[in-house]
Amino acid sequence: MKLNLRQLQKRYIVLLLLLVVFLPVPFRMKGMTKLEITGLDGTRITTDAYTLTADHELMLDKEIAERALGARIGWEKQAPLPTGVYYKDQVAVLMYHHLAVAPLTLNPGVLTVGQFDEQLRLLKQEGFHIITMQQYRQFMLENAPVPDNAVLLTFDDGYESFYKLAFPILQKHGCTAVNFIIVSDVDHPDKHQVPKLTWEQMREMKRAGMDFYNHTYNLHYYGIVDAEGGTRPAASALLYIDDENRNELNEEYYRRVTGDLAHAERRLKEELGNTDSAIAFPYGSYNDKLLEASDSLGIRLKFNIGQGLSSRTTMNAPRINEGDRTLAPALSIERLKHPAPPMVLSVNSVPVHLTGAPPKLRKGRLMVPIDALSKALGVEMQYDRSSGSLKLSPGSLNKAG
């Protein structure tokens, strides 16, 4: 009997459904495997109210964690700060793109020289502290402190205006900034585009304290993702292969983006002597595979274009767009004075220093990082993922008990 394509497709779908129904429970319900907990006082708890973060950090339901640790756990808004302190232990990462002497285009993303100069003046006047990329890196990766009201200045795309217009103003105010470079634009300049930085200009500025990092080698464009010609950011989408009438496979995508980022990293090291790494994702668009590719290359510091302050729990940091010409400098700085109060994790009313994942809601339950809580209490934690067991035992410290 000869089957047509539609019949084959139907049989294939039925077969898949049967496999799903009859697969052993541990495989279908892997996320619901019970966790066996031995609490600090020896109490045995069996629960499925847990999850793992992308970094394999164990998160427990708050009530389960309180029983296991014998402690009160809080997750509340930060207490009011002293006058003149708008935020602490966080960084406002500001984002700019292009500068012009006067507003020559309708593009609101092209800030004038006067506006940028006034912004920097007001930042200092209003008690903000502009930090270097090294300070930011040490804050994020080494637990180093930053000043209250800390600010990191970042630019995207590597426009030559950074050298000709922004650089003199930064020097005038004693500030440094980071520029994320589309590296192929430097290696292969296009006279029909807005002029971009040269390697020599970057080397000069790097000697003066500026930093230059990865904005991909050549993934800063919208690529075709379907047969109808739809487009999405090329760095975060499975591109359409027209000759084969299909989209990239996940493996093909991963090889493409990893190769591109590695090429950019190599060129930045060759030309500028970079010994560390960071990346700003084009258009702020990313996915888990792109984050994984970045991590595989040692690019731990990542930046997107989401709004908000950066903390040690946000390795893929949001940025605040201050390159909006339609917003007066005074108003743009005023926005920074009123961030949403951050949430603070506490154990027995003592704040817990978070460097990993913060608490999060999952199906109506507040999930809390048991590793951070155990450290705060000086509790030893033994988690065996393969056997699904967690054992807590008294340690040599008792910081919050």
Image: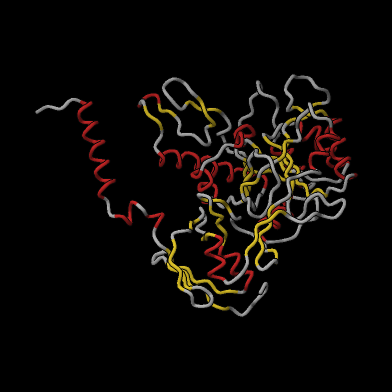
Residue at horizontal 56 percent and vertical 71 percent from the top: 69
Instruction: Count how many numbered circles sit on residues in the image.
Output: 0
Q: Residue at x 76, y 50 (%)?
A: 132
In the picture provided, is 386 more to the left or to the right than 380? left
Q: Is residue 398 visible?
A: yes
User: 198 left or right of 386?
Assistant: right
From the viewer's perspective, tell me whether residue 193 is left or right of residue 113. Answer: left
Figure check: 13 above or below 20: above
Residue 76, given in percent of the width and then of the height, sits at 68, 56
- The vertical placement of 141 against 390, above or below, is above
- State the residue in front, 32 or 153: 32
Could you say where residue 50 lies in the image, as x and y percent from the top left? 48, 58
Q: Where's residue 258, x and y in %?
A: 50, 43
- Quadrant where the C terminus is found in the figure: bottom right
Q: How is the image coloured?
A: secondary structure
Residue 269 in sight from this viewpoint? no
In the depicted structure, whether residue 171 falls above or below residue 79: above
Residue furthest out toward the left: 1
In this view of the protein, which residue sits in the foreground, 287 or 395?
395
- Which residue occupies the foreground of this view, 384 or 28? 28
| Quadrant of the rendered image containing residue 210 | top right
Residue 138, x across and y down, in percent: 70, 58
Residue lying at 53% horizontally and 77% vertically, measured from the top left: 41
Residue at the (57%, 36%) spot, across then down:
285
Residue at the outermost bottom position: 396
Position of the N terminus by quadrant: top left
